[in-house]
Amino acid sequence: MVETTDNSAVLALRPGDVVVLSRDGLDALISALREADYDVTGPTVRNAAIVLGPVSSTSDLPVGYRDEQSAGRYRVVKEDDERCFQWAVGPGSWKGEFFPSKQEQWRAVRSGETYTFVEPRFESPSLAIFGARPCEVAAIGVLDKVLSQGTYGDARYVSRRRDLFVVVAECGAPASTCFCTSMGTGPGASDGFDLSLSEISDAGGHRFVVRVGSERGGAILSTVARERASSEDLVARERLLEDAETTMSRRMPSGIAAVLAHSQESPRWSEIAERCLSCANCTLVCPTCFCSDVHDVTDLSGAVIRERTWSSCFDLEHSYLHGGSVRASGGSRYRQWMTHKLSTWWDQFDASGCVGCGRCIAWCPVGIDITEEAALFEQDAQLPEPEASAR
Amino acid sequence: MSVAATHTRPTLAVWKFASCDGCQLSLLDCEEELLALAEAVHIAHFTEMTRTSVSGPYDVSLVEGSITTPEDAERIKEIRANSRRLVAIGACATAGGIQGLRNFAASGDYAGTVYAHPQYLSTLDTSTPISEHVTVDFELHGCPIDKGQLLEVLLASLAGRRPVITGHSLCQECKSRDTVCLLVTGEGACLGPVTRAGCGALCPSVGRACFGCFGPSDTANTASLAARLANDGATELQISRLFRTFNANAPAFLAESRAHESTEVAVHFSASRIVRRP
Ligand code: SF4
Ligand code: SF4
Ligand code: SF4
Ligand code: SF4
């Protein structure tokens, strides 16, 4: 058991404090969260991937796993490694926790000639997300703008989001698909967390540098055996993040919002459409895509149920108006996705709709790469305008 | 007076053409809802359930199976004339089914292989979907259909609303239930990206790649998926076969299997003939 050598053992830890936990300490943190009645959800290995699920101890984490990702390809590999966070991101994002793929909005129950409207009550234990990546925390910030701020918040989202406890795990092993550096969302975490972990494994041993981001983060960490962070620990964390940045090979061009705003008629859209399957995987794995469909169904008792399901701009029904779909071509659908993520999202929510997690690249069955396409659009924009051609 | 007004409840009829009965049995599979359904509709003709048959006209006819004989080509017209709404159910009724493989073979080739005395058979050279013969009000896909979707079509009919049934890709159902993608993890050659949703991603959820039994989605880009499969090492023969199963004659799948057709496919057909023992 690690002796508590930190003076703050008597005083609660405060935002900005930095301590070091052993793996046992991390287990104690998980237990403390569970004792405080949090539903602790985090990464775990299932079906050849790192997915999200309940976490009751560090042995539920992907200990010794790393992921290999490239366009249209994802593999997990088990190695003889004590580290828990040597991988980037899996297919599932925390979006599903706040914004489930299917949700009843209300039902109208019939008795005789009258209907009674019943709204579901959204009550669930407080959620602690354990080991979220900085880009994923940024994505929750983006979703907040869409689903909880503004005039009409989404009731379920707001209730699940309200008491969210965030334990972020800074990135030491970005995948080849990652480009958070160019989106300003990682690999280090700057805000939006209660506690931030950086996993170190060097001559000084296997440990977690933990930064406190909130009062309640400090309070819960104060109950756990820990050590004061040394200057070596702080340097090791800096090195971890620097190495992560150097390994990140993909990037998003910085002026892409303006470039796309002027690329609406580009022939590139139909070229991409030859490859694009309109399968919607990119939008559904994206941690910020929020599109949904609402429909009313009936049952044999005469009740009417209004339900909301995930949808996507790759879906023909998504742009269906009387008489047909507005976005009938594959090119127009891909244009909607890419332009919304990187350009019109700014107009709508004063933010980028992309945080650089790379999921849409890895989980696209045909490996269409949003950064590669963006670079081509940028290149086109730098070429002299072609002579007015027959459109 | 309208047909419906002569009965207190709408009438339902279930018809069979060339098929295995699996789709119509989906109605009996609706075990929990069956009694309530039997109260809401009058099941007037359904030989898998009862020998009693009430004559038409019918409010809703569910039609299973494909058209493979001259008699059936006539019978479907009578059923159409006797039905206010006609719903084609299953891969046979919507795309010609697995028996639609005969459309790729020379006339009588399969019959000669399977039957000892094919001269007693009277069949058409092709197996075709119901929509090639009469107007169809709604098509329910799958081999077999999904009982939830069947119920939804019936409920929608009863309420006079559009059924909530989509034509988008199966991948959306995988993602909605957190099934990890088999194609991207290298676990299977999955047809999900070009296949219509509806089964709830049944196969991928148990680790089996989708083999397209719901037929092409609304926006199926089969050529791009085929290129990916070839890149993963699939041969032309394998790709052609992948698209040539239950929905071999659905236009998007037909075009793709033809694009990868090689002499090998034809050779394989004759080599696979069943050798009859005396
Ligand atoms: S657009 Fe792609 S890289 Fe950007 S946040 Fe969405 S899934 Fe991640
Ligand atoms: S990119 Fe498409 S699915 Fe995503 S939020 Fe925009 S319109 Fe919706
Ligand atoms: S970009 Fe890829 S994942 Fe997205 S719809 Fe097209 S093929 Fe599917
Ligand atoms: S397993 Fe198949 S259906 Fe599911 S997402 Fe992957 S490609 Fe699509």
Image (cartoon, rainbow, N blue to C red):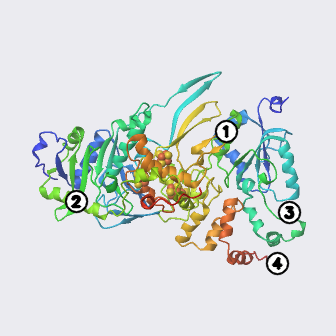
Kindly identify which chain the residue marked by label 3 belongs to: B
SS state under label 2: strand
Q: Residues within 10 Å of mark 3 (few under 14, many from 20)?
A: some
Q: Are marks 3 and 2 on the same chain?
A: no
**Separation of residues labelled 4 and 3 (CA atoms):** 25 Å
Say which residue appears at 67% left-offset and 55% top-offset. B143
The mark nearer the N terminus, 1 or 4, is 1
Viewer-nearest of discs 2 and 1: 1
Above or below residue B96? Residue A221 is above
User: Residue A153: x and y, percent?
Assistant: 42, 33
* Pointer 1 and pointer 3 on the same chain: yes
- Same chain letter for marks 2 and 1: no
Q: CA distance from mark 2 to mark 4?
A: 75 Å
Which residue is pictured at 32% across the width and 48% down the height?
A130
Q: Which residue is mark 3?
A: B123
User: Earlier along the polypeptide chain: callout 1 or callout 3?
Assistant: 3
Q: Which mark is residue B278?
A: 4
